[in-house]
Image (tube, rainbow, N blue to C red):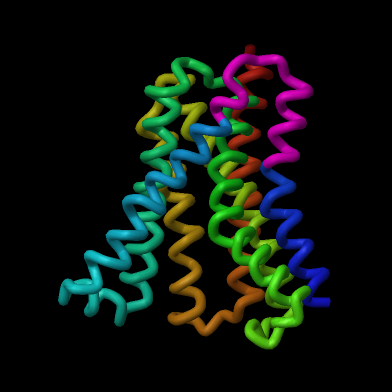
């Protein structure tokens, strides 16, 4: 069962974003779809892997106020959630506003979100699952005493995380498209804060288990996607 769970997670982490991009490229002949996907991936990589994560892991641990902050689940959760939202949504806005050069149709937002959420899934989960799968098949599974259920849940988590990134990308892009950038960027940051802060707050302040936290994340992710799709659908209806 562990092998099946690993294969499922790998398929989700790599297949969903790449497959989604192929579908978008096949069904839509708009220019810039592939570029939007690449900029979305780069926005995550730069904002998180090159800036925020190194700050959290290398800079802040040496500061007294950060050590105190970690003792309070509400303050620590909100700090992690807000910084994630600020860095990632800010990177989305910069890439969309200055690098996509007016390509703000729905298909571009979908591609951007798939790139952003896809590279996150690949780097944070997919690569690890690939390495573990190789070692398990080579008879070294004892090095990774993992439960199949937990691994499967980790893969499924990437589905709603990617849904969130697609929805948030649509919101930020819609704000640029309609000239209401501050409003929709702010909404995206707020939703991102809510989603990520809950991981710490629900578990440490309320004792919510893994399944409860995952359920909350899935609800926020799907609602964000629905909101992103909804604003574009409303625009089309009005026009």
Q: Residue at x 72, y 24 (%)?
A: 25
Classify residue 165 as left or right of residue 74. right
Seen from this angle, which residue lies furthest front?
A: 138
Q: Residue at x 69, y 76 (%)?
A: 150
For residue 50, say whether it is visible: yes
For residue 170, say whether it is visible: no
Depicted 100 relative to depicted 151: above or below: above
Task: Point out the stretch of residues depicted in magenta.
Answer: 18-36
Snapshot quadrant of residue 148: bottom right
Q: Residue at x 80, y 72 (%)?
A: 3
Q: Residue at x 75, y 81 (%)?
A: 139
Classify residue 174 as left or right of residue 232. left
Q: Nearer the viewer, residue 138 or 130?
A: 138
Classify residue 183 as left or right of residue 38. left
Residue 85 lies, in percent from the top left, at 40, 50
Is residue 218 covered in magenta?
A: no
Main secondary structure of the magenta stretch = helix
Is residue 29 covered in magenta?
A: yes
Snapshot quadrant of residue 140: bottom right
């Amino acid at each position: 069962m562990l092998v099946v769970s690993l294969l499922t997670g790998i398929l989700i982490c790599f297949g969903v974003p790449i497959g989604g991009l192929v579908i978008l490229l096949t069904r839509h002949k708009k220019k810039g779809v592939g570029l939007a996907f690449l900029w979305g991936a780069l926005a995550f990589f730069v904002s998180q892997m090159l800036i925020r994560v190194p700050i959290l892991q290398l800079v802040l641990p040496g500061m007294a106020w950060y050590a105190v902050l970690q003792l309070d689940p509400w303050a620590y959760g909100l700090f992690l959630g807000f910084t994630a939202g600020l860095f990632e949504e800010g990177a989305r806005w910069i890439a969309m506003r200055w690098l996509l050069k007016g390509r703000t149709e729905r298909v571009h937002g979908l591609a951007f979100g798939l790139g952003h959420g896809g590279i996150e899934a690949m780097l944070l989960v997919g690569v690890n699952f690939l390495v573990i799968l190789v070692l398990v098949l080579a008879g070294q599974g004892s090095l990774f005493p993992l439960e199949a259920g937990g691994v499967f849940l980790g893969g499924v988590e990437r589905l709603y995380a990617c849904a969130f990134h697609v929805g948030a990308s649509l919101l930020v892009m819609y704000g640029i498209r309609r000239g209401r950038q501050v409003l929709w960027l702010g909404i995206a940051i707020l939703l991102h804060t809510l989603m990520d802060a809950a991981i710490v707050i629900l578990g440490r302040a309320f004792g919510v288990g893994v399944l409860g936290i995952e359920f909350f994340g899935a609800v926020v992710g799907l609602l964000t996607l629905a909101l992103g799709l909804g604003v574009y659908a409303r625009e089309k209806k009005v026009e």
